[in-house]
Amino acid sequence: MVRLDLGDVVLRRMQEKDIEAVKALIKEGCEGTENRLILHLLTRPLALLMLATLSSILRCVLHSFIMALVIPVFLLIIYLKLTIPRSVGILGSSRPYWDYVGSSYHADTEPDLPNPLSNRAKLITNQEKSRRRKKAKEKEKEKTNEREQVDEDELKERARVAGEVWVADSDGDIMGCVARDGWSRDGVCRICRLVVQSWYRREGLGRLLVQGLESKSKQNGIRRVYAHVPFPSRVGEAFFRRLGYRLQGETAGTEGEEEDEDYEEPQKGWLGFPLTKVFVKDL
C-alpha cells in the first residue's frame, strides 16, 4: 500500500488514451467477482434442489454416488462460466459491455469533478494547464490519422448511451475509476463500477471518487443515486453504508418506504437470482 495525498488527485473524465489502463484496472478490481457470483448461485435453495434431483437420477444410471454428485455441479459451473460474462456485463446495467470509445468522446472538454481536498495540493498554473492541453491535442491529432473515422452523429449517440467513466489521476497514473451508467431517469443516476488500484486501497480514494461524482450529479439536478454492489460483497456493502447509502427497501428515516416509481431493479442472472444488491442515497 502506498501513502497517497488525496489533495494531489485530479478527478477527470476518461479520455481515449486512458482506455487500456482503465480496462486493466477494472479487470484487476473485478478479479474473483465471477467465482463469488457462481458460488452464490450454486448455493441458492432452488439450485441445490435441482442439483440434488439431477444427481439422484444420474445415480440410478451411473451406479456411482461420486460421479452422480460431481457431474451436475461440474456442468453447471461450466455453463455459468460461459454465460455470466455476457449476462452480467456491467454490473447494474442491462448492457453486456462498456462502450469505452463512446464514453471517452469529447472527454477533454468536460470539467473535472470537484475534489474537496484539493486545497492541500499544489496549484497548477494556467500556463501549465494550457501546455498540457496543447500536448494532449497534438497527440490526439496524430492518432486521428491512424484510426478509423467514425461518423460524428453516431459517436455522439454512442456517447449519450455509453455513460461516463471518471478516473483518479495523479501525475498521469490512473489509480482508480468510477462509472456512471448512460441509463437515465429524471433526477436519478446509477453507479455501475467503482475500482481502486490495489496499491492505493484503504487510502480514501474510493470515497473521493464517489463523493466527487455525487457533487457533480447534485449540481446537475440529480436527487438520488443508486449503486449496484455485486452479490455477495460485504466490503462493498460496508463501504457504501459508510457513505450514507442504504439498502433499497430499508426505511429512509421519516420518509418511509421506497416509492414505487423510484424502485431500482437489481441485476439478475441464472433462474432469476439477483446478482447485485441495490443501495440508494438521496442527495
Image (tube, rainbow, N blue to C red):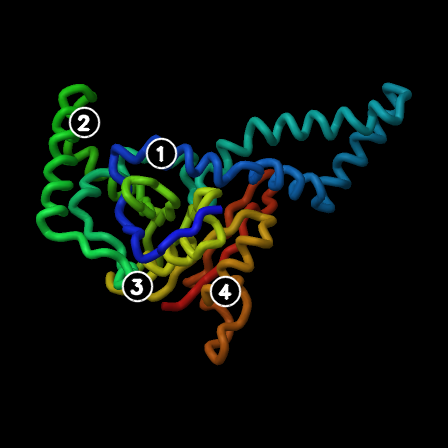
Q: Nearer the viewer, residue 268 or 78?
A: 78
Residue 16 visible in the shown view: yes
Q: Secondary structure at mark 1?
A: helix
Write the residue at 42% across / 53% down: 206
Mark 4 in CB contact with mark 2 (< 8 angstroms): no
Nearer-N-terminus badge (2/3): 3
Q: What residue is pinned by disc 4?
A: 242
Q: Where's residue 147, x and y in %?
A: 20, 21
Which of the two marks, 4 or 2, is nearer to us in this view?
A: 4
Determine the CA span between mark 4 and mark 1: 28 Å
Q: What residue is pinned by disc 2?
A: 150
Label 3 sits on what residue type? Pro
Q: Secondary structure at mark 2?
A: loop
Label 1 sits on what residue type? Ala
Mark 3 in CB contact with mark 1 (< 8 angstroms): no
Q: What residue is pinned by disc 1?
A: 21
Nearer-N-terminus badge (3/1): 1
Which of the two marks, 1 or 2, is nearer to us in this view?
A: 1
